[in-house]
Amino acid sequence: ELIYERGIYPESSYIFKHALTQEVVYDSILGKRKKQRHEKIGRAIEELHQNSLDENYELLAEHFIKADNFDAAEEYCRLICRKAAKKNFIEDAIAYAQKRLDCLESLPQTDDVRKKIIDTRIQLGFYFLQMYYFVAAKEAVSPIIETALKYGRGRQLSQTRIIEGAYHVWVMEDMPEAYKHLDKAIKICRETNDFISLVWAQAQLGAATGVNCDFDNAGSNFQSNIDLAENTNSKWGLALPKSSKSYFVFTFQGRIHQAYKISREAVQLAEESGDILSKAHSYACHGVSCYRKGYLKEAEKYLVEATTACDKINLFLWGSVGQHSLGEVYYEIGDYNKAKHCHLFAVSLANKIQFLPSWQNLNKIGAARAIVMDQEKDVDLERIYNYVSNIKIKSVEGWQRRYLSEILLHLDGDHLTESKEWIRQAIEADQRNDMTFHLAKDYAVFTDFFRRKDDRQSAKENLNQAIRIFHEIGADGWVEKYEKDRATL
């Protein structure tokens, strides 16, 4: 009773009753014989399953790795990566790209092997990019980046530039350098008809220009990706640019009706595809558009689903976006303790991939805002002022200032003048950057300031401004909320 037969002959297999028994037997075999047996097993699988090798790539790769047959192992790892990428199983693709790289670096360094190492490092970096692991992507290509940028051609060169551009956006917050790399990548992709790389270059440039409030450029890049995706049968491939356009263009700019419509379409496509990465992405973007609509219960539902899905596949960026928006939802419904924890969790997730220091600072200020509203007065104002002074991303300029104004407004009666100055700066920034939803929220906070000053006329004027903007951008729930608020004035 040490082993059991599973299945029906000739498709049957044998398994050990206990893993420990298997381990003891395996460890009793001498190292050299182990390698020989793994080689024989690999060749036997190739012979027995000639017509279904793709179903056995993983087994073959593992046996040939253990046999030290790195030539065969790296080839099967390459095939596994290709299979995983087609199904959007990016974590599997990363794991086997790393194994392929290890195999190649264990071989004699001929010219052919060195070329494969360059290809594999760029491929590994590109897989990391698809999970938004920008530092890991940069580290994957760092050993070969000078060679790739100097001598690379076609896809090698374009993908290297995409990785460099993404790193400069999301880690360094250096927009001019990022645009330089991404614009060059797009040009190369178009010259070589490399549509896969083009999609990712345009997605990165669209997101970068979106967070920096160049909404025309952002919208153009995402629409190009939507047009490309509509020519394929990939529902998850269409869900990604639709949800991205919703988030980086429409919700940032304040075109809330369009954001809600397109993000809902993205959710439907992602659910029909069954792909968890696109579902996580789409749920997060739709949750944000629900919040901007003022549909707080619906927003909470989708944002919780987004964070759950992101947690399953370690999709830290969109997990951070989901947690931040949950923090805003809970703040609005008065659950300040939950709001604080969501903002701090958003910081923790973003920090795992060193994502946007300005975004992390926004969430730290958001947590402080919730702490103050929860009747805790012990906040480090000096540190918060430093956060606001180190902004490099346009989209958070007014956002951070509004949060700070709310902190000062509710901290005590000694900071009202400062609160007024910060909300004025928030209004100026959001007008300048065309952040219309945030502009309406600024006026709503200004209303609270004038209430505190018992200036009902000014309070009503600012609240009317907020309601007018919310109505224009299609934020129905906020219109209803603030119209009820206006009645009390």
Image: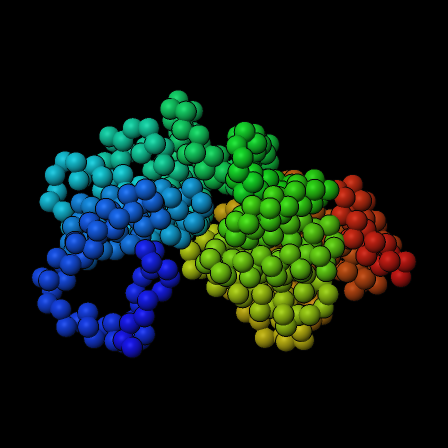
Drawn side of residue 164 relative to residue 385, left or right: left
Image quadrant of residue 223? top right
Residue 468 percent location from the top left of the image: 81, 44
Residue 176 percent location from the top left of the image: 44, 37
Drawn side of residue 317 relative to residue 33, left or right: right
* Extreme residue in the front direction: 9
Q: Residue at x 67, y 60 (%)?
A: 300
In this orientation, which residue lies closer to the viewer: 89 or 386? 89
> How did the renderer colour the structure?
rainbow
Quadrant where the N terminus sits is bottom left
Q: Residue at x 56, y 60 (%)?
A: 307
* Extreme residue in the top direction: 191
Residue 338 percent location from the top left of the image: 63, 70
Residue 438 showing in the rendered view: no
Q: Residue at x 16, y 54 (%)?
A: 40
Drawn side of residue 428 relative to residue 142, left or right: right
Quadrant where the C terminus sits is bottom right
Residue 206, compared with residue 273, is above or below; it is above
Residue 294 showing in the rendered view: yes
Drawn side of residue 251 relative to residue 75, left or right: right
Residue 190 percent location from the top left of the image: 43, 24
Residue 291, compared with residue 179, is above or below; it is below
Q: Residue at x 61, y 43 (%)?
A: 269
Residue 55, compared with residue 407, is above or below; it is above
Image quadrant of residue 111? top left
Image quadrant of residue 444? bottom right
